[in-house]
Image: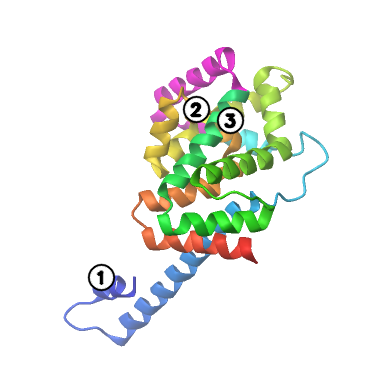
Amino acid sequence: MYQFVMKALSGSTMSLERQVIAFGMTAFYKGYLMDEINAISTKIVDSFEPKSIPDSIFSGIMSVPEDMYYLAYGFLDTKNRSENGNDYYRLATFIKEGDIDSAIVNLVEAIARDFIETLPEDKKDALLNSIYAKIGARFATTTTLMYLLTSQMNRSIARYPKLKASLGILRGAAINSILTIGALAHRSTYDSRELREKNPSLYRRLRSMGDLDILYFLIKDYVSGYVDASSMQEQGRDEDYRRVIDNVINQLNS
């Protein structure tokens, strides 16, 4: 990064001021990068150590200001209105005809598989052993790694109230707020689009599995660490990706 900045700022000569700017930009980038790596690895580790959960099953659902934000943003987003409409239709069709519980299981499995497929071979055993040490498992194959990740993700998701509240609204069990229903629909389409931009291959996989991308918003908060790590690999950031995995292994072993 430093060499890139120096090259970008340099002309025929490099003044002291430009060198100072280059060093400053490099330091800022390194700090940002470390924050990103630490944040992603912590999210993954947290799936093995779910934090305390609120008492009310509705305490995790979006607040009214957040509802208003998604509704207002969707209303003003005239550029994507046609695509948004298609996504709303996909969500409505899924709610009417699909099995949401089974879909969430399949969604979690697809995300776990995507994460495992990007893991370097030399990191799979190390991660597996760290997970065993953390939760006391007694197996040692990649298939078991798949099982461990999906079971931990599902356990983490099941412990939190936000999903329960959202599912209750989508199924009609708590349809007492048109505001919230509309906000969930808007969040569904924008989180799906964010996934498409961040990790196109995972997006395509979920879309091909029966429009599972449209339900990603339901579990995004609990699996985003895995998705963000896989996205680094897809973007060619191999070194950063390996640092994330090393961080996860070190945190699990600590």
Pick whichever of labels 2 and 1 is earlier in the sequence. 1
Quadrant for the C terminus in the image: bottom right
Q: Is residue 250 left or right of residue 136?
A: left
Q: SS class of the residue under badge 2?
A: helix
What kind of residue is marked 2?
A: Leu
The residue mark sitting in front, 2 or 1, is 2
What kind of residue is marked 1?
A: Ala
Q: Is residue 144 above or below residue 35?
A: above
Q: Is residue 121 left or right of residue 214?
A: left
Q: Which mark is residue 105?
A: 3
Q: Is residue 128 left or right of residue 238?
A: right
Residue at left offset 73%, top offset 51%: 51
Residue at left offset 31%, top offset 87%: 16
Instruction: Give x and y (percent) for residue 7.
Output: 24, 73
Q: Nearer the viewer, residue 194 or 207?
A: 207
What kind of residue is marked 3?
A: Val
Crowding at dot 1, Cα within 10 Å, few <14 / some 14-19 / many 20+, comes out as few
The residue mark sitting in front, 2 or 3, is 3
Please name the residue that numbered disc 1 is placed on: 8
**Does residue 40 show up?**
no
Whether the magenta-drawn stretch holds residue 82 is answered as yes
Please name the predominant secondary structure of the magenta segment in the image: helix
Instruction: Give x and y (percent) for residue 239.
Output: 39, 63
In space, the residues marked 2 and 1 are separated at their CA atoms by 43 Å
Quadrant for the N terminus in the image: bottom left
Q: Quadrant of residue 96?
A: top right
Which residues fall within the magenta stretch?
72-100
